[in-house]
Image (cartoon, helix red, strand yellow):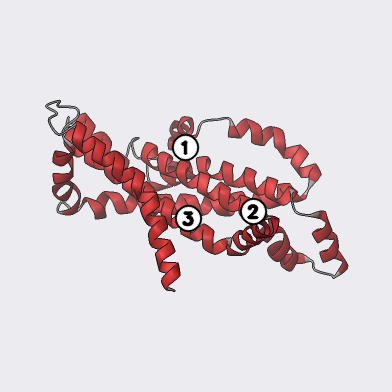
Amino acid sequence: MTALLRRAARNTLAAAALPIALLALWWVFTADSDSYYLPPLSDILASVDDVWLHSGRLRTDVLPSLLRLLAGFTLAVLLGVGVGVAIGSSRRLRAFCEPVLEFLRAIPPPVLVPVLMLFAGIGNTMKVLVIVSGCVWPILLNTVEGVRAVDQVLLDTARCYGVRGPARLWHLIIRSASPQIVTGMRQGLSIGIILMVISEMFAASNGLGFSIIQFQRTFAVTEMWTGILLLGLLGFLLATAMRVFERRALNWYLGLRQTQRGGDR
């Protein structure tokens, strides 16, 4: 347990070293700044309490953004994995769907915001759908490739032993494709954070993106920078949470790779 805690602390420090160094450089180079558009970092950090903590914006703006991101990302995972497994398991279905998938994937999700506003309104449904429209593609495509790469020997062995249905799907196909599925989830999460902010800049009444654009429109530049820093912090925390999930979900795979590397030496 002690060795595990030491390793976790070492990994955390390694991940935080570059952001801390960049913040230190920002602090030094803007310490004497008199630019209205680039205030000193010390002024920006001093405003965080009043702008986000004491004003209740964490509850009224940040929390709704995170809930929309969670809803959109969850739907994208369910849709991407479900459709990806179906397409990856069937050569005919893959050949039939591939042109349409390539066409839809090439459409930038922000372009869909006006279209989704026409069909879903300007509420939370539109914002969640915008997140889904961008998150789903890396998850779906990585799932398709992961399912296609399942070892044929394992498939034949499972067939010989009568492993079929849900057991074959869960224990063989999804488990074998899980490294690429998780890779798609990690990519989709990054896209989802971007789309969360973009969707809240259109006809919104709350959210982190809404607050940042309101600060910009009212020339509250220092407050705008606090929102940008908070968004970066949330992205870092979500990426860290995804990394922890990846290690737990792929513990068997990471252990297998480590064993193989040890055997090659």
Q: Quadrant of the N terminus?
A: bottom left
Which residue is depicted at the point 38% across and 61% down?
9
- In this rendering, would 46 be left or right of 158? left
The numbered mark at residue 243 is 3
- In this rendering, would 51 be left or right of 186? left
In space, the residues marked 2 and 1 are separated at their CA atoms by: 23 Å
Q: Position of residue 211 (x, y in %)?
A: 25, 40
Which residue is depicted at the point 35% across and 40% down?
200
Residue type indicated by callout 3: Arg
- Tag nearer the camera, 3 or 2: 3
In space, the residues marked 1 and 3 are separated at their CA atoms by: 32 Å
Q: Position of residue 153 (x, y in %)?
A: 83, 58
Residue farthest to the right?
160
The quadrant where residue 101 appears: top right
Q: How many marks?
A: 3
- Secondary structure beneath label 3: helix
Question: Residues at badges 3 and 2 in contact (C-beta under 8 Å)?
Answer: no
Q: Which residue carries the number 1 mark?
A: 116
- In this rendering, would 241 be left or right of 178? left
Question: Residues at badges 1 and 3 in contact (C-beta under 8 Å)?
Answer: no
The quadrant where residue 12 appears: bottom left
